[in-house]
Image: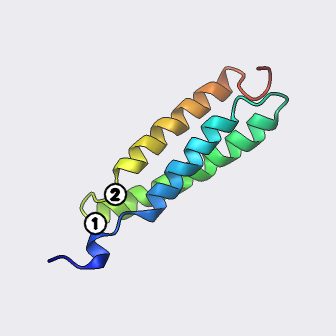
Amino acid sequence: MSSFLERRSNPTAWAAFWFALIGLVLMPIPLFIGLILGGGLSVVAAVLAVIALLKGLARSGKGIAPVVFAAIFIALNWGGISVGGGTIW
C-alpha cells in the first residue's frame, strides 16, 4: 500500500489551475480592470505552473493534469488580452 505522501496530488498545480481560471474569468472586465486583475493572476498562475511542472516531473509525472489545463487557460487569457480584453470590451 502506498503512503499518504505518494497519493497526495500536486497542490501547486491546483493553485496554478485556480489562479488561471479566475484570471480568465476576470479578464473581460473593461476599463483596464480586467487587464490588471486577469493579467496579474495569469502571471502568478504561470509562475506556479512552472513550479508545479517541475515538482510533478520530479515525482514521475504525478499531478501534471491541472498544470496542462492551467497552461491552456493562461494562453487563452494572454490571447484575449492581446486582442484588447480588459481594455476596450
From the image, tell me which residue sits under label 2: 63
Q: Do the residues labelled 1 and 2 touch (CB within 8 Å)?
A: yes
Q: Which numbered disc covers residue 81? A: none
Q: In this view, does 58 lie above or below 17?
A: below
Q: Which residue is drawn at 45% across and 64% down?
A: 11
Looking at the image, which is closer to me, 76 or 51? 76
- Residue 9 in the image: above or below residue 82: below
Which label number is shown at residue 59?
1
Q: Is residue 19 above or below residue 89?
A: below
- Disc 2 marks a residue whose amino acid type is Gly
Give the x, y percent position of residue 33. 81, 37
Residue density around tag 2, few if under 14, some if 14–19, many if 20 or more, within 10 Å: many
Q: What residue type is disc 1 on?
A: Arg
The residue under the point 80% across, 20% down is: 88
**Mark 1 surroundings within 10 Å by alpha-carbon count, few (fewer than 14), some (14 through 19), many (20 or more):** few
| Residue 27 pos. (x, y %) | 69, 34
Is 12 on the left or on the right of 42, as rendered? left
